[in-house]
Amino acid sequence: MSEFTCKAIWNATPDPQDCGWPACGCDPYANKVISALEESGSIVGRAEHDRRITELLEANTREVERRREAEAEVSRLEALVYVPGVWRCPKCQLSLVSTILDASSGRIAANKEPQRCPNDCGPMWRVTERDAGNRLIDDMDREVERRREAEAKLAWRPIASAPKGIEP
């Protein structure tokens, strides 16, 4: 029995290429072994292998598309949840509005890059619409209370005598 030499090496140019042995089909002994293994179910045939690879590639493509859609949805929802460019330090409660000014085009945009507190407290957090609304209400309540206190200190009273024809 002669020793087998791959056809790619047998017909070799100065730089022989690998033929993909044993599945290339150029070795009759390897073909018999591969056929026997396929029949026994120990390995899958080339067609089954290609079918499985195609299924995996299609599934991967679907997952990549779903991820892109999910990332787009997250971006859309972030725009609804966070106040653009507004940051707050959780330690010192400093509020910061961060914008990007483009001198060449005149564009102004909210800066979404993470910010550090100017007071060296650490990283600042983005402000949600709910937090901004709650803070606005709290500020309004505080100002109404200050107004009441100022009126009480000034002893403000309604005018006792109104002009004729106008009831107090």
Image: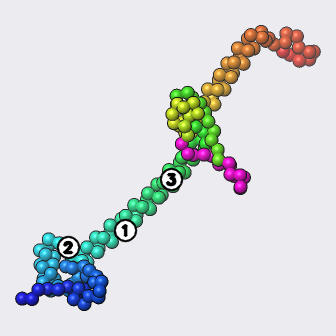
Residue at the image point whose x is 37% and y is 68% from the top:
58
Q: Are marks 2 and 3 in contact (CB under 8 Å)?
A: no
Instruction: Categorize mark 2 by other alpha carbons within 10 Å: few (<14), some (14-19), many (20+).
Output: some
Residues at marks 2 and 3, CA–CA distance in whole angstroms: 41 Å
Q: Which residue is denoted by mark 1 in the rendering?
A: 58
Q: Are marks 1 and 2 in contact (CB under 8 Å)?
A: no
Q: Which residue is denoted by mark 2 in the rendering?
A: 44
Q: Which residue is denoted by mark 3 in the rendering?
A: 73
Position of 146 compared to 94: left or right? Answer: right
* Vertical side of 25 occupied by 149: above or below: above
Q: Nearer the viewer, mark 2 or mark 3?
A: 2
- Which of the two discs, 1 and 2, labels the residue nearer the N terminus? 2
Q: Is 156 in front, or is 38? A: 38
Residue at the image point whose x is 44% and y is 62% from the top:
65
Q: Are marks 1 and 3 in contact (CB under 8 Å)?
A: no
Residue at the image point whose x is 58% and y is 33% from the top:
118
Three-letter residue code for mark 3: Glu
Q: Main secondary structure of the magenta part?
A: loop
